[in-house]
Image (tube, rainbow, N blue to C red):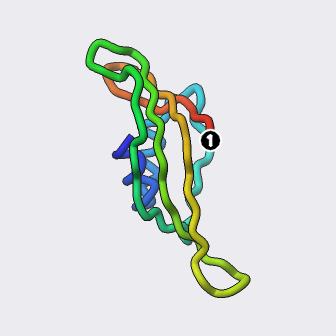
Amino acid sequence: MRSRYTAFATGDVDHLVRTWHPRTRPEVLELDPSTTWTGLTVVRTERGAAADDEGVVEFLAGFEEPSAANGRAATGRLHELSRFARRAGRWVYLDGDQR
């Protein structure tokens, strides 16, 4: 989860593609370079231990985007419950529900 947040924050599309389950991964992934990610808080986790094949991470991610209306950055927060699966020994993102 943290590595995927860092990939969003730094624009590392290759890492996001590698860590996204092929069944749910979009064919094209484009990040908005004007979005600045400002912080990650993991709220809770379920499963995801060494003996598990699935896990859930609930997180909050802060961001800023330019605002055309007043020239200032608009701030926001992404609240998501993400599902992960272990595939070939590695954790990959399946999907998530925004809260």
**What residue appears at the point 46 percent right and 43 percent down from the top-left corner?**
59
Residue 40 vs 93, above or below: the answer is below
For the point 30% across and 20% down, the residue is: 49
Q: Position of residue 83 (x, y in %)?
A: 50, 28
**Vertical position of residue 95 compared to residue 34: above or below:** above
- Quarter of the N terminus within the rendering: top left
Residue 84 in the image: x percent, y percent? 46, 27
Quarter residue 86 falls in? top left
* Residue 99 pos. (x, y %): 62, 41
Q: Determine the image quadrant of residue 80.
A: top right
Along the line of sight, the residue nearer the viewer: 79 or 90: 79
Q: Which SS class for mark 1?
A: strand
Outermost residue on the left side: it is 50
Where is residue 32, by image quadrant?
Answer: bottom right
Instruction: From the viewer's perspective, tell me whether residue 54 is left or right of residue 27.
Output: left
Q: Which residue is mark 1?
A: 98
Indicate left or right for 94 with 90 as reference.
Answer: right
**Mark 1 residue type:** Gln
